[in-house]
Each structure stands twice: as C-alpha cells, then as structure tokens.
Image: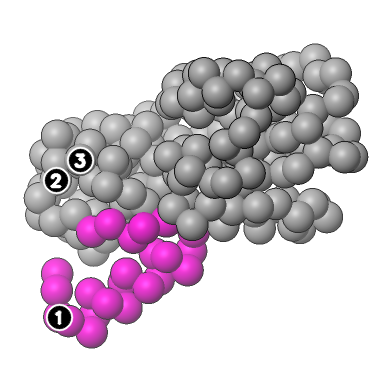
Amino acid sequence: MQPVLDIEPISVEDPENGFEFVVFLSEHAVRCGLPHLDLRNAAVFAVGERTAAVLKAAGVNARVPHTQSSEGLLGMPELQQVRDSRILVVCGAAGRELLAPALSRRGARVEKLVCYRRVPAGKLAVEPSTVEAIVAASGDGLEQIARLWFAADGRPEVVLLVPSVRVAEIGVELGFINIHDCAGADTAAVLRTLETLRATGAK
C-alpha cells in the first residue's frame, strides 16, 4: 500500500554537545537529526529495530528495548537512574509526549531535537478492493490511513497490522475490526505476523 505520510525535514540549529544519552524515536529522526549531532561519548538508544538499523548503517550502534515503544525505553535499566544526566530526544513534530516528561520526572535534564514533520497524502492512490493488508507503523500514521481508507469506501475488516497494543486500540476507535499486533514496527515483526496469519488461515 502507498505511504500516507510524507516526511518533511525541519530546519534546526545544531544542539550543543555533552549529552550522556541520545534517544532516537524513529528512523526519520535518524535521517533528519543525525547530521546535526556529535554522538561521541553518548549512549545511543533507538525505539525499535528499524530505527537501530538506520543508525547502524550510519556507523552508530544503538541499544533497543525489548518492547519497541516509548514505554519499552522507559523500562530499560540504563534509563532508570538518570538524575542530573543530559538526555537528548530526537523526534518529529506532534509526536507522543511521553518519553521526555517521564525522564524529566526522574530528574534528567531533557532536551528535544524536533527535526521533521509528517505531511498527510492527499488521497488513496489504489483501489481498496485490491488491498489485502494495511501496515501502520504508528498511531499518527494509522489515523491518516483511516482517513484515506474510509473516504475511499475501504472495508473495515481489511487486515490491519500494527506495532503495539496502543496502536491496536487506536485502530478499534477508528473503526477497523481485523487488527493484528506485530509487537514491533520493523520488517521482521510484520513478516512474522503475516507468516502466522498464513499458517493459521486467518484473514
């Protein structure tokens, strides 16, 4: 299925150095934010495997939570005792406001590098009857998919693959009725779920 959100980089000023922890909340955050950063001496974290893979391709090794989400990052042992630590969160505009406030409550000095925004596509470019499954990588993306899908008279029972319980709940609220949690947004997680659906005959 077509992408429903284009990524538009935002002009940012290079942040000061000296961060002890740098957290990337998406692969787009890596592509748009990494050129502005000096990561020497910083512990780098990625919200999921896809984000970590883009970092690795750029020569940066990142730690990934077992549960690939902001909640998973907050549960990592390395991010528990962070009082007085400088933490940079690299993200897009209008994203979830969970990680930075939670780390601040733990006593960290948190800054955000907002380096891109999501721009919705105008309309669905495919016939809904030809679509067997929809993959949504985020709640924001799913909301845009739903807008285009139902405007084109798409079926609510289409297979919808989501990365987490939270996004699955958003899918229910939006009117989808055949939702499958992939437990991750990376390609491997999506393929595992598709294989399971094929093996069980689920539709």
Which of the two marks, 3 or 2, is nearer to us in this view? 3
**What segment is highlighted magenta in the picture?**
180-203
Q: Secondary structure at mark 3?
A: helix
- Residue carrying label 2: 176
Task: Say which amino acid is labelled 3.
Answer: Glu
**What residue is drawn where x is 15% and y is 80%?**
201
How many marks can you see? Answer: 3
Quarter holding the N terminus?
bottom left
- Residue carrying label 1: 201
Mark 2 and mark 3 in contact (Cβ < 8 Å)?
no
Task: Say which amino acid is labelled 2.
Answer: Phe
Left or right of residue 196, residue 56 in this image: right
Q: Pointer 2: residues within 10 angstroms few (<14), some, or many (20+)?
A: some
Q: Position of residue 149 (x, y in %)?
A: 22, 41
Please say if 181 is above or below 90.
Answer: below
Q: Position of residue 163 (x, y in %)?
A: 36, 51
Q: CA distance from mark 2 to mark 1?
A: 19 Å
Please say if 169 is above or below 53.
Answer: above
| Residue 75 in view | yes
Residue 181 location, quadrant: bottom left
Residue 175 location, quadrant: top left
Instruction: Please tell me which of labels 3 and 1 falls first in the chain.
Output: 3
- Residue carrying label 3: 169
Mark 1 and mark 3 in contact (Cβ < 8 Å)?
no
**Residue 176 within the segment the image draws in magenta:** no
Instruction: Please tell me which of labels 3 and 2 falls first in the chain.
Output: 3
Q: CA distance from mark 3 to mark 1?
A: 24 Å
**What residue is drawn where x is 65% and y is 29%?**
82
Task: Say which amino acid is labelled 1.
Answer: Gly
Left or right of residue 184, residue 13 in this image: right
